[in-house]
Image (cartoon, rainbow, N blue to C red):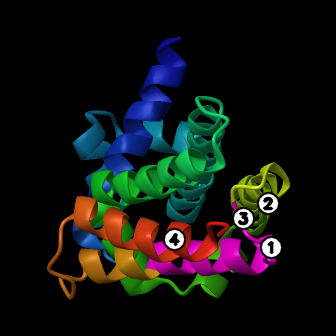
Amino acid sequence: MEQLDKRQLILAAAGDVFATQGYHRATIEQIAEKAGVGKGTVYLYFKSKQGLFDALLLEGSEWMLKSSREVLSKSDDPLERIRMLIQLHLQIIKRNHPLMRMIIQEFTPGKLKELRPELGQRVREYQALFALVLEEGIASGHLRQHNPHVIALALIGALSQIGANLNNGRLDISLADCEQELLQMFIVGLQKG
């Protein structure tokens, strides 16, 4: 149990250091100091700074998928499920604001996938969750006919752009207001009748 706790402590410290220093300026020494462990301890768990960053990204994406699935299990109503996915995505952006800002500033999506190819699979799984909810909405008669894969990409793209602009200070609006605007645009636009 202690090893898992120490690993998680190092990952949390790495997230903070990467967020404040940026990926390229961050050092293993800074991460070790922030975690309250020796530099050698960091290397016991992670082979390099890139390995640590990769683990942070991969575990973060796995957590996001798990959280999305948990949220979806709370309702059968397709409109409510879309609302919950939008809300969760925006909350994750808010909670991880400094780290998300650093990732957006220093890495293109292609570069992230190149660093950690499994991220591409996680992104596809995340898109599939959105598409599934939209497909269920069509099947239940709540949503009009549309291509759920295109709309899922559009919704995730909108969420990502809003997150990038919020994190860069180019959008002066609350997350709650962003959520309402997205719900209006997507839900009203997709509702049947």
Mark 1 vs 3: CB contact within 8 A: no
In space, the residues marked 1 and 3 are separated at their CA atoms by 18 Å
The x and y percentages for residue 43 are 52, 45
* Mark closest to the chain's N terminus, 1 or 4: 1
Q: Does 167 sit left or right of 77 as displayed?
A: left
In space, the residues marked 2 and 1 are separated at their CA atoms by 6 Å
Please, what is the three-letter code of the amino acid marked with disc 1? Gln
* Mark closest to the chain's N terminus, 3 or 4: 3
The x and y percentages for residue 77 are 63, 41
* Mark closest to the chain's N terminus, 3 or 2: 3
Please, what is the three-letter code of the amino acid marked with disc 2? Ile
- According to the picture, the residue beneath numbered tag 1 turns out to be 145
Sort mark 2 into few (<14), some (14-19) or many (20+) by Cα contacts within 10 Å: many
Label 4 SS: helix
- According to the picture, the residue beneath numbered tag 2 turns out to be 138
* Mark closest to the chain's N terminus, 1 or 3: 3
